[in-house]
Amino acid sequence: MAVLSEGEERLLAFIREGRVDAEIAVRLGLSTGEVRERTRALAAKVGVPGKAELAAFRGQHGSETPALDPGRNGLLARPAVAAGIVAGVVLFALGAWLGRSTAEDSTRGATAATTPSPASVVTQPPATVPPPLVLTLDGAAAMDLGQLVTVPAPALNPVLDVDRRETLAVVTLAGAGVVHMQGPYLRLVRNGGAYSETTLGTQLVAVFVFPADRNTEFIPIDGGFAVYAKGDALPRLLVWATETRGVAQDTRWARSFHVSVTTSGELLVSVDPVSPALAINNRTGESLDLSHARKVGVLPPLLGNTFCDAEEGCVVAWRGAGLPAPFDGIARCGDTSAFEYGDPSTGVRLVFDTFAGSPSPACPPSPQSLRAGDLLGSGSFVLRGMDPSGRPVALAVAGDGSLYAGDIVPKIDCPCLHFN
């Protein structure tokens, strides 16, 4: 009767859980070739043909293998990172992790070169996957979408710290590791862009992961990417979730969700988007304090975004569409012969900067009174606020379209969202 060593029991436990060779390699500190060789040897030792039969092996030839993974049941269907890629790329790029030889690194580098095209689209996971666990995040329901990050040190939690903003999370890892963008609840869409999709109820949601600083480096691999930091720094990730209409759709003006990552590396996404009454600094993902500002008008929802920086304060970006007047006011040419729109009752003036090649709204030959909702112009604009004396006034727009002006002092601490 075969008696299994501790190492063989660990390998068998991972095989039973359905883990692929690459993930087993990361967790055991082996190359994928070593995992395959040990799997063949283990199958021969217990008298079964191969890995599939090992998954069903229950100790007929020895004692039962104990449950060795401290993870909960929801982690049994780990993201399926393609065989030969994760350990190949991670250990090749970060060979110091496990002290592999130069010859081994060269072999793994050749394996990494066979990674499928980052533009490949992965199909939806099987319909037999059980629904994700529902947990609580900020007092609201959130879905546990499974393991997002792992590091090759089983004794460590992969996540050291999570800096949670209103609509994103900045995650500091314990060391170099692997980010899994394909799993039971995530469908990898674009590997090079670290973009996956999931479904919350009937809503299609995009999940993005970016480097949060210049020290953090990504290496795209099949099913996700390897991540490490230069020098003595630790890798930091920016995680963001927003509604989407599908691949290649602009999500910058879509509703965002609360996100977080647990210390064990699992991704949490709120069931519902953030409150539409919030105005978000889309450079940092933080909500803005509007208590010292006043509501001056209304724009169509989800077509304007707020951007704040230390030099120019807060402005509103309007994407390419017809821009209606947010309040009753007067359109005229300003002191610089540029179009501006003002509210006589509040003294707030809107000055228009264009971007994305859109022309400025045409100046009327004389001041023109408009009603709220009348068309000001079509295109993409940056709206800046001015008071009657020409001093800058901060502007912000909430998710429901409410336009605010006044004293809006955000925290100016990037990392910024990727599209900025």
Image (spheres, rainbow, N blue to C red):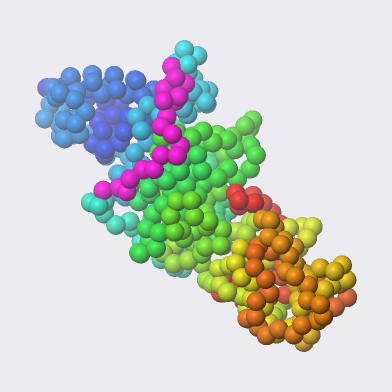
Q: Residue at x 49, y 23 (%)?
A: 92
Residue 208 visible from this viewpoint: yes
Where's the N terminus, which quadrant?
top left
Q: Position of residue 93 (x, y in %)?
A: 52, 25
In the rendered structure, the answer to whether residue 111 lies left or right of residue 44 reads right
In the rendered structure, the answer to whether residue 196 lies left or right of residue 277 reads left
Residue 275, above or below 370:
above
Q: Position of residue 79 (x, y in %)?
A: 36, 42
Q: Residue at x 47, y 47 (%)?
A: 195
Q: Which quarter of the figure has residue 284?
A: bottom right
Q: Residue furthest bottom?
A: 345
Task: Compare residues 52 and 371 and report the one nearer the observer.
Answer: 371
Q: Which residues are magenta?
A: 107-126
**Residue 285 colored magenta?**
no
Q: Residue at x 34, y 20 (%)?
A: 34
Count of numbered badges drawn on the protein = 0
In the rendered structure, the answer to whether residue 24 lies left or right of residue 61 reads right
Residue 336, above or below 96:
below
Please name the predominant secondary structure of the magenta segment in the image: loop
Q: Which quarter of the figure has residue 204?
A: bottom left
Q: Position of residue 63 (x, y in %)?
A: 17, 31
Q: Position of residue 247 (x, y in %)?
A: 45, 51
Residue 142, above or below 219:
below
Q: Residue at x 15, y 27 (%)?
A: 62
